[in-house]
Image (tube, rainbow, N blue to C red):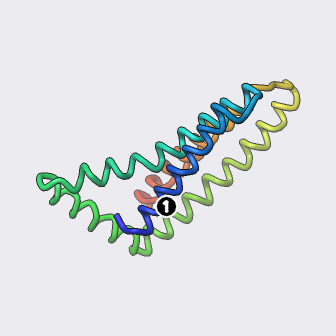
């Protein structure tokens, strides 16, 4: 793990702690306090989990597996075909997300929902990731 990656993870941990503490103590509205707590927990987990992964793969008995994984990641990052596939997958997923968000906005205005908004947007972010992954693997096999 490079110093730049460590700094990014420490920033995520710091933002997570601030949001979580703000959600517990600083926000009086229950809805926004819960959103701040969940956002803080998400940032905190996003910052802490890479450290556990790093410690797991840095142990002597998993060192060879780590080096193979790191080598494959480096090759995939440089490979031009993989870069094109990532770009194409991102384009396809964002195109689908645009249509889904428009449809969702229309449905939400008709239903006049309140707390569903946060749950649906979280579901959409997961859906966006899944669409990008499926598009990447489909395009990888096709080429």
Q: Is residue 25 visible?
A: yes
Q: Residues within 10 Å of mark 1 (few under 14, many from 20)?
A: few
Q: Above or below — where is 40 with respect to 15? A: above
Foreground residue, 101 or 8?
Answer: 8
Q: Quadrant of residue 60?
A: bottom left
Quadrant assignment for the C terminus: bottom left
Give above or below for 82 relative to 58.
below
Judged from the image, the secondary structure of the residue bearing numbered disc 1 is helix
Q: Residue 70 placed where, x, y %?
A: 28, 64
- Whether residue 16 sits left or right of residue 116 in the image: it is left
> At which x and y percent is residue 74?
34, 70
Q: Position of residue 115 (x, y in %)?
A: 74, 26
Residue at 53% from the left image edge and 57% from the top image edge? 11
Inspect this view and state whether residue 119 appears: no
Question: Which of the pair 26/41 is nearer the observer?
Answer: 26
Q: Residue at x 55, y 65 (%)?
A: 87
Kindly identify which residue carries mark 1.
Answer: 8
């Amino acid at each position: 793990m490079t110093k730049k990656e460590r700094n990014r993870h420490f920033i995520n941990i710091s933002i997570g702690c601030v949001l979580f503490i703000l959600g517990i103590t600083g926000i009086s509205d229950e809805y926004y306090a819960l959103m701040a707590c969940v956002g803080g927990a998400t940032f905190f987990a996003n910052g802490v989990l890479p450290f556990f992964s790093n410690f797991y793969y840095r142990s002597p008995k998993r060192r060879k597996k780590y080096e193979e994984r790191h080598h494959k990641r480096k090759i995939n990052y440089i490979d031009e075909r993989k870069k094109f596939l990532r770009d194409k997958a991102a384009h396809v997923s964002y195109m689908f997300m645009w249509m889904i968000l428009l449809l969702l906005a229309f449905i939400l205005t008709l239903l006049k929902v309140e707390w569903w908004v946060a749950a649906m947007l979280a579901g959409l972010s997961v859906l966006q990731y899944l669409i990008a992954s499926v598009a990447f693997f489909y395009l990888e096999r096709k080429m």
